[in-house]
Amino acid sequence: MSIKNPSVKFIIFVLMICTFSIGYTEYAVMGILTSIANDFHIQVSSAGLLVTAYAASVCLTGPLVTIISVKLPRKPVLLGLMAIFTLSNLMSALAPNFAVLAISRILSASIHGAFFAIAMVFASEMVPPEKRAAAAASMNGGLTVALMLGVPFGSYLGDVLNWRAVFSIITALGVIGFLGLMAAVPNRKPKVIPMLMNEWGVFKHKQVLFSFAITILGYSGVFIAYTFIEPILRHSAGFSTVGITGALFAYGLGGVAGNFFAGKVPLPLLTRTMIGVMIGLIGVLAVFPYIAIYPAAAIVATFLFGACAFGTPPLLQTKVISSSEGGTTIAAAVSVSAFNLANALGAWIGGMILNGTGSYSWLFAGGALMTACGLVLSTFAHLSEKKSVYEYQVNKG
């Protein structure tokens, strides 16, 4: 079953369905932590380990699976990864205990990095260089739509029914994504067969290393707070099921807005724009606990949180791909791993802060501090870029 000569837009749309499904399963847990904790009679901070386990699995398996599959035709690899994703989420829906749920989450995460890396490079190969940021934003579009629609809807289902219904829906989405890949994605090898020795040379590029470090340190600040956003909103704003659903929708809507904005940024302005977005993110994190006690203000703050949080990934990923000539696949996989390492680190630090202080407010202080580290690195990266441009102009002159 395949469609003859599918358009580039349709292929990217199918890839977005898959990234939506994968993004949904990654972030949905953050909207149903209370439901999972109550079902298995554990603390919310313990349930938060599911986030850490997923993200850690992405970090470890993403580059490895990508290396194994980098020379293979894209279509069977993407189909195989999506099949594993679908079965692992079915396992999550049927998990009899917390340990099985954790194992299924690790298995689901094992395909995450490789799928995003292959899909992102595949999409970038189908468009001209000046549209690569938009292609990266399209890949992240699946994630942001998952945040806007999937996470709040999942949180609502978790309250009204139970958390297992959420994973059942994700399983169905996995089946749809699998069928879409089978029908739309052309069965061809990479335009240029990657040489692994050349691929690893990507780590010699200073701006690539800067991007990875900015991601790990700066973006972990987002997940210190966002991992526990559902119980935070219940506690601070006094939201019930409907309020939580609305706030999570606002976060996702902000994520879509930030992602759309980032996709329009031209290559020379990536780092400078990233500095501005991080300053905004620090500001939002700093004031969030003080204004979230008012329901309307909590919705607005959550929207701004999402906009700043998802204004950075397309910028960083485009920066990595544009700076890694000859090693884009490995670079893209490590970039995804870096984001998930930030996810795992943030969730772990957030859990420690919550256990140590017993206060959700301190999560935002920790998040702002970590994001400030990313801001410092972004500034150094910008100065390094300016120096390189100056030296190039002097040598050319």
Image (tube, rainbow, N blue to C red):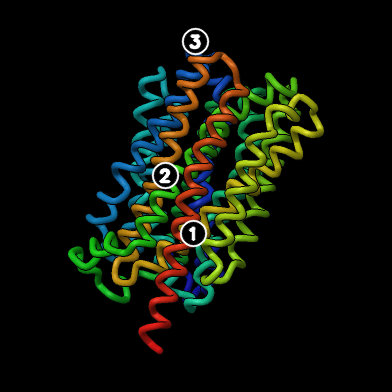
Residue to which mark 2 is pinned: 216
Image position of 331 with respect to 49: above or below = below
Tell me where residue 361 appears, x and y as whole percent.
62, 23
Which of the two discs, 3 and 2, sits closer to the camera?
A: 2
Q: Is residue 82 visible?
A: no
Please name whichever residue, 156 or 387, is drawn nearer the observer in this view of the structure.
387
Q: Amino acid at mark 1?
A: Leu
Which callout, 3 or 1, points at the residue further toward the start of the chain?
1
Q: Residue at x 50, y 73 (%)?
A: 6
Dot 3: what SS? loop
Q: Amino acid at mark 3?
A: His
Q: Residue at x 39, y 49 (%)?
A: 213
- As drawn, is 292 to the left or to the right of 189? right
Which label is found at residue 15? 1
Measured in 3D between alpha carbons, the distance from the residue under mark 2 to the one under mark 1, in whole angstroms, is 25 Å
Residue to which mark 3 is pinned: 41
Dot 1: what SS? helix
Please name whichever residue, 208 or 87, is drawn nearer the observer in this view of the structure.
208
Q: How many marks?
A: 3
Image position of 359 with respect to 319: above or below = above
